[in-house]
Image (cartoon, grey):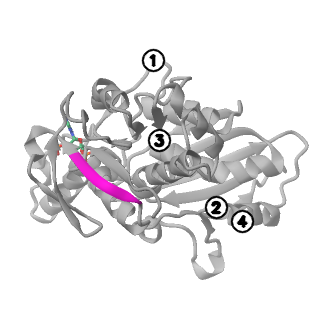
Amino acid sequence: MSKRYNVAVVGASGAVGEELFRVLEEVDFPVANLLPLASARSVGEEIECQGNTYKIQELTEDVFRGKEIDIAFFSAGGSISEKYAKYAVESGAVVIDNTSHFRMNPDVPLVVPEVNPEDIEAWEETGIIANPNCSTIQMVQLLKPLHELYGIKRVDVSTYQAVSGAGKAGMEELVMQMQAFFNFTLDEAKVESFAHQIALNVIPHIDVPLENGYTKEEMKMVNETNKIMHSDFAVSATCVRVPVLRSHSESITITFEEGVNVDVEKARKALGDFENVVVIDDMSKNEYPMPIISTDTDETYVGRIRKDLYADNILHIWGVADQVRVGAATNAVRIAQKWIALEEGA
Ligand code: A2P
């Protein structure tokens, strides 16, 4: 029988944690034992996975000791990873970290398995593999085949990000505000997860503002994209929160090297041939990617593929993916699968 692995999930009660258990089950991940961890608030809550029931335990410095954890998924926020990832690594586990904490550390590989799986090899430097920002993951899956085709010079992206990016609390806040709207009490509804009311609104502000006029979320897209793609093209991002429960959408304008004359059919084929990318692009039938298509799936969808009206080397595309899955849980599990293949010499 092939090897099975002991798996810990930090943030087991959160939006990404819960999705991780679903994905592990769906891909029939070779789990030997599962250790779900969260704060003291969730201790004793039950997790079902692959026909077994596990109880959430409290995350502590000692909790990994003696448990022979092979793989520890962290998805409980950057400060938790900062404090506790080292204890998982010390106990012998590889940490697959879903927070931004380690992403730009030059010794930590930042991986989207369809784009730079070879970087996983460097995991032994620190024992940590970082999962990129959700908006970055779905964008680089579309940029990679186009970069190979024509060579990218510059990317301008505007995101339309779902409230799931702010975890369960963000999703609850949108639902509660919509309920309040129908009860004529929206003025009194709680505003905590976002800077403003998100129901019936659009907020051009995700994560903290920085001195250069961008937000931290926008700079994550800039910096992480070039780290993952081993490239140095220009990226400019505007990240926007929209009242959608799940799945981020992105309007992406790609400027290729001087002299390139983009062939839309070639670009469409390169995108369609890329692993886990699906082209939906037929305006005559009202067919294009939307959150209601991508939610609960593991693919990244692309459509509205069209050449710029003025410059031959510019292409516009529209990409959509489920942020909780493609942008977090599924990407993390795909990293773990590649890590296992590496460990087993496959
Ligand atoms: P808990 O539910 O016990 O607070 P989300 O991204 O959906 O907001 O979820 C965040 C996840 O991070 C939850 O599982 C949450 O557990 C966990 N978490 C938050 N703070 C801590 C902490 N101090 N120790 C361990 N887990 C934490």
* Apparent side of residue 181 relative to residue 272 in the rendered image (left or right): left
Image mark for residue 131: 3
**What secondary structure is marked by label 3?**
loop
What's the residue at 75%, 46% (across, down)? 147
What's the residue at 33%, 31% (across, down)? 91
- Tell me which amino acid carries mark 4: Asp
- Residue 138 visible, this angle: yes
- The residue nearer to you, when weighing 281 against 120, is 120
The answer to the question of whether label 1 and label 4 lie on touching residues, with beta carbons closer than 8 A, is no
Q: Which residues are magenta?
A: 30-36
Cα distance between the residues tagged 1 and 2? 38 Å
Q: Position of residue 261 (x, y in %)?
A: 88, 52
The residue indicated by pointer 1 is 211
- Tell me which amino acid carries mark 2: Glu
The residue indicated by pointer 4 is 273
The image shows residue 277, relative to residue 58, as above or below, that is below
- The residue nearer to you, when weighing 25 against 199, is 25
What's the residue at 25%, 35% (across, down)? 64
The image shows residue 52, relative to residue 111, as above or below, that is below
| Main secondary structure along the magenta-highlighted residues | strand
Image mark for residue 275: 2
**What secondary structure is marked by label 1?**
loop
